Image: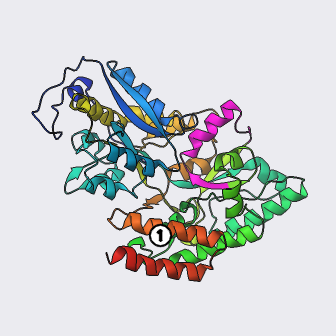
């Protein structure tokens, strides 16, 4: 989906904003005074977006330094919640997805940044961060989940690559055929790799299944998606959930080192793959992007609009920020919402919240990004539904479903038993509370 809007951000105006909402007397800030603000990030060695935003902002605001503070990607929210409670959290922090937005906002852990979000008119993901007419975070990224595939491994296995028409049944058939073909060619690669994230199953099921509603507490829509995953595991067409956990497999190495011919993942992986190819952490091979497999034929083909999922990734301001830094933090949020920042992110393969024609041209102009029409279509054309509808119940329900995900894919419980237990727990532990 392409959204075009012009953004003009005045650095001088942004940095002379009056500090408000932090207690005490309001006072203006000297726009020329040196100031350092801290920004949360994760996997800094392989995730270049945070440094890109910090450097881009510094170029237009030479008196402001954005210092990065690294968190563990897998435990980001747990660590951030602890740091916010202890008063040691950075000045600006990332909301990785919408799962915990309600918790952060209702707990008073986000400053009102409505003024900084004024440049986001027309960006649909901005609405997710609004409560009672006020905005509490600014989206800088809007990923969608797509199918990455290795053209070379498809050719080696003599399997036809994706053409945009795949349903999930087609995906399963291809994964099995790839595994057989690759084994016959002397390769140990599997047809596909499903990472341990609950998103890899539950995100697609929620987005694509007619009538699916996370907040209803009825999780029957998950059943066919789990049955397919278990079938692929049993067939050896993807590593088992237990193997992925025990061996600490990463999706970056599985696809980047050609251990799997396909990978369902968010578009953020484009940036990681490009960076790892340049460092040797990923092999050099021909690859492409296709739409994620679809629920049925009604949304397949390049004349239709495929359905996928993806939460925006936003930035909010810690309300405990020093009052002398608030104006700089607000100016930084205005910058990340701009087309200038969007082009800077696109230049490293990241999909910004604001996708314009200029942004798309920048990303597909990068060395190593596939140029075929299907890759362009998959990147730009889709209906994106949220993985985490904003609600006070979302975090609790998703925590239960994360345990359900592990129980099913580790074969600890059957699909029906696990989903029935999840529904009972959802009702008793979350929805009726």
Left or right: 93 as drawn, with respect to 254: left
Residue at 39% in and 35% down? 39
Left or right: 63 as drawn, with respect to 146: left
Within-10-Å neighbours for mark 1: few <14, some 14–19, many 20+ = some
Relative to the observer, which residue lies in front, 80 or 121?
80
Q: Which percent across, then down, holds residue 175?
A: 74, 63
Q: Which percent across, then down, holds residue 138?
A: 33, 44
Q: Which residue is mark 1?
A: 400
Residue 268 is covered by the magenta coloring: yes
Q: Which percent across, then down, holds residue 217?
A: 42, 77
Q: Look at the picture and state if 51 lies above or below 285.
A: above
Quadrant where the C terminus is found in the figure: bottom left
Left or right: 400 as drawn, with respect to 109: right
Relative to the observer, which residue lies in front, 73 or 32?
73
The kind of secondary structure element at disc 1 is helix
Q: Which percent across, then down, holds residue 162?
A: 68, 58
């Amino acid at each position: 989906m392409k959204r075009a809007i012009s953004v003009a951000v005045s650095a001088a105006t942004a940095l002379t904003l009056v500090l408000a909402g932090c207690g005490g007397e309001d006072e203006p800030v000297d726009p020329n005074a040196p100031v350092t603000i801290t920004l949360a990030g994760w996997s800094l060695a392989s995730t270049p977006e945070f440094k890109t935003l910090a450097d881009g902002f510094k170029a237009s605001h030479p008196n402001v330094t954005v210092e990065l503070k690294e968190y563990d990607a897998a435990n980001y929210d747990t660590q951030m919640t602890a740091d916010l409670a202890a008063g040691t959290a950075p000045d600006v922090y990332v909301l990785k997805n919408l799962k915990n937005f309600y918790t952060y906002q209702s707990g008073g852990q986000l400053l009102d940044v409505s003024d900084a979000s004024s440049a986001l008119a027309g960006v649909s993901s901005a609405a997710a961060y609004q409560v009672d007419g006020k905005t509490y975070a600014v989206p800088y990224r809007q990923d969608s989940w797509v199918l990455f595939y290795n053209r070379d491994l498809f050719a080696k296995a003599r399997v036809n690559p994706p053409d945009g028409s795949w349903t999930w049944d087609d995906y399963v058939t291809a994964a099995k055929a790839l595994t057989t073909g690759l084994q016959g060619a002397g390769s140990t690669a599997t047809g596909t790799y499903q990472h341990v994230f609950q998103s890899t199953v539950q995100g697609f099921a929620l987005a694509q299944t007619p009538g699916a509603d996370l907040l209803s507490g009825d999780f029957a829509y998950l059943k066919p998606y789990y049955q397919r995953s278990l079938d692929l595991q049993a067939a050896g067409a993807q590593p088992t959930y237990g193997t992925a956990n025990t061996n600490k497999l990463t999706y970056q190495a599985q696809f980047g080192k050609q251990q799997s011919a396909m990978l369902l993942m968010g578009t953020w992986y484009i940036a990681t793959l490009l960076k790892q190819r340049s460092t040797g952490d990923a092999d050099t091979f021909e690859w492409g992007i296709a739409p994620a497999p679809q629920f049925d034929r009604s949304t397949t083909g390049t004349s239709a609009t495929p359905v996928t999922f993806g939460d925006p990734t936003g930035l909010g301001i810690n309300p405990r920020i020093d009052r002398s830094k608030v104006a700089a933090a607000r100016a930084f949020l205005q910058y990340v919402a701009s087309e200038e920042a969007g082009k800077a992110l696109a230049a490293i393969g990241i999909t910004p919240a604001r996708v314009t024609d200029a942004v798309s041209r920048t990303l597909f102009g990068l060395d190593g990004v596939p140029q075929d029409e299907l890759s362009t279509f998959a990147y730009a054309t889709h209906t994106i539904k949220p993985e985490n509808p904003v609600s006070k119940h979302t975090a609790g329900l998703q925590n239960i479903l994360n345990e359900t995900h592990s129980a099913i894919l580790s074969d600890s419980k059957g699909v029906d038993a696990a989903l029935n237990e999840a529904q009972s727990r959802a009702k008793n532990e979350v929805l009726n509370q």
